[in-house]
Image (cartoon, helix red, strand yellow):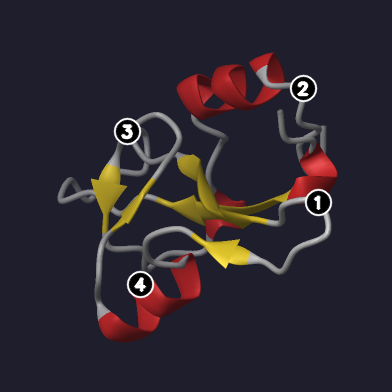
Amino acid sequence: MSTQADLEVHVASTPQIDEGDHERFTHIVLEGYTPKDGEFVPLDNSVVGGMINATPVKALCGKVWVPGRDPQKYPLCPTCKEIATSMGWSLPGG
């Protein structure tokens, strides 16, 4: 079982087609992990890579999107938060 120290988590926002911000959330993206006595193992695309290359990333809640907005402007996705806390991860700012 992995601990928070073993996991690399990145928080990213979800752009929506709707111009209103009421349905936008900040999502948690697991970018990889570090096994005991091992090097970082990346998973799928990183959020930064997604922003630069316009490639989709996948959040803990299952949302797939191309990141492109400042995640600090939006509330944390309740589903991502629930999944992360159920795994014992501490979240930034909370």
- The amino acid marked with disc number 2 is Gly
Q: Is 59 located above or below residue 62 in the figure?
A: below
The amino acid pointed to by label 3 is Gly
Amino acid carrying label 4: it is Gly
| Lower sequence index among marks 2 and 3 | 3
Q: Earlier in the sequence, mark 1 or mark 4?
A: 1
- Residue at 37% x, 68% y: name it: 68
Q: Earlier in the sequence, mark 3 or mark 4?
A: 4
- The quadrant of the rendering that contains the C terminus is top right
Q: Is residue 44 above or below residue 84?
A: below
Q: Quadrant of the N terminus?
A: top right
Tag nearer the camera, 2 or 1: 1
Q: In this figure, which residue is indicated by the disc labeled 4?
A: 50
Q: Nearer the viewer, mark 1 or mark 4?
A: 1
Image quadrant in which you'd find residue 89: top right
Judged from the image, the secondary structure of the residue bearing numbered disc 3 is loop
Mark 2 vs mark 3, CA separation in Å: 19 Å
Give the CA separation, mark 2 to mark 1. 18 Å
Label 2 vs 1, first from the N-terminus = 1
For disc 3, the marked residue is 62
Residue at numbered disc 1: 36
Viewer-nearest residue: 71 or 1: 1
CA gap between label 3 and label 4 equals 16 Å
Which residue is at 23% across, 49% downward?
16
